[in-house]
Image (cartoon, rainbow, N blue to C red):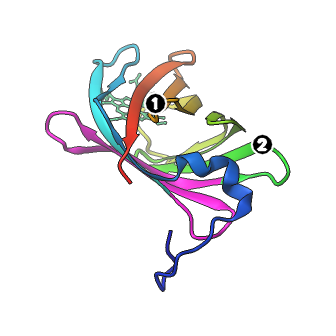
Amino acid sequence: MTSPVHQPVEMNPAILPLDWLLGTWQSDEPGEGRFPNIKPFRYLETLHFSHVGQPVVNFAFNAFHADSKKPLHRECGFIRMQPETNNVAFIVAQNSGLVEIEEGEVTGQQLNLRSHTIARMSFAKKPHVKEISRVFQLSADGRLEQRVSMATDNQPLMEHLRITYVRSS
Ligand code: HEM
């Protein structure tokens, strides 16, 4: 990782439990999206996790249409850890006009999160999201998986997204 003057910066020990996320990840095959009342879809996604020496992981997720490669969903934010614990806060803004804080725990190479706070712009599309749960898991073969479930005005908590990535840097 580099600073504005391009000096390598050491990782802050506070985020060591999340070091397995750092780098750039590309979906190895299209992810699968589903939810009642929408057409199941496939998508590509790139994840970037980085740090600048602060006790914070910076991230940006960019999803694309699997065939046209058109940009679709985008998210960016920060991950912080509560000192001396495994507690994690995942602070995220989405291009749909949703902002949220998810909280959870890192255990080994798995990060389990559940929405703690959700807010949206006044003219956000319906249905509104009421709850989100998200898991990142690094498997023994070096692939990273992300699964996202959500509850909306109309539906209880159920899976929306499932995708695996390979590290590209
Ligand atoms: C935490 C992240 C996300 C949230 C909270 C979210 C939320 C939603 C919601 C609320 C809907 C409408 C569901 C309904 O009509 O019942 C939806 C639909 C959809 N989402 Fe997501 N989404 C997320 C991530 C993504 C990602 C990464 C993609 C990748 C391309 C994606 C693609 C879609 C598509 C294609 C639809 C269907 C749109 C339509 O038919 O109009 N979403 N999402």
Q: Disc 2 versus disc 1: distance between alpha carbons?
A: 24 Å
Residue 86: mark in rendering: 2
Disc 1 residue crowd, few under 14, some 14–19, many 20+, Cα 10 Å: few
- Which quadrant of the figure shows ligand 1? top left
- Number of other residues with Cα within 10 Å of mark 2, as a class: few under 14, some 14 to 19, many 20 or more: some
- In the rendered structure, which segment of residues is drawn in magenta? 50-79
Residue at 69%, 63% in the rendered image: 55
Q: Is residue 57 above or below residue 31?
A: below
Q: Could you say which disc has been placed on residue 24 in the image?
A: none
Amino acid type at circle 1 is Asp
Residue lying at 47% horizontally and 31% vertically, measured from the top left: 145
Queried whether the magenta region covers residue 115, the answer comes back as no
Along the line of sight, which residue is nearer the eye, 160 or 139?
139
| Residue projecting furthest to the right | 84
Taking the spot 48% from the left edge, 32% from the top edge, the residue there is 146
* Relative image position of residue 71 (x, y in whole percent): 25, 46
Query: Where's residue 8, x and y in %?
Result: 53, 76
Q: Which mark is residue 141?
A: 1
Q: The C terminus is located in which quarter?
A: bottom left
Amino acid type at circle 2 is: Asn
Task: Find out whether residue 53 is within the magenta segment.
Answer: yes
Q: Is residue 42 rendered to the left or right of residue 21?
A: left
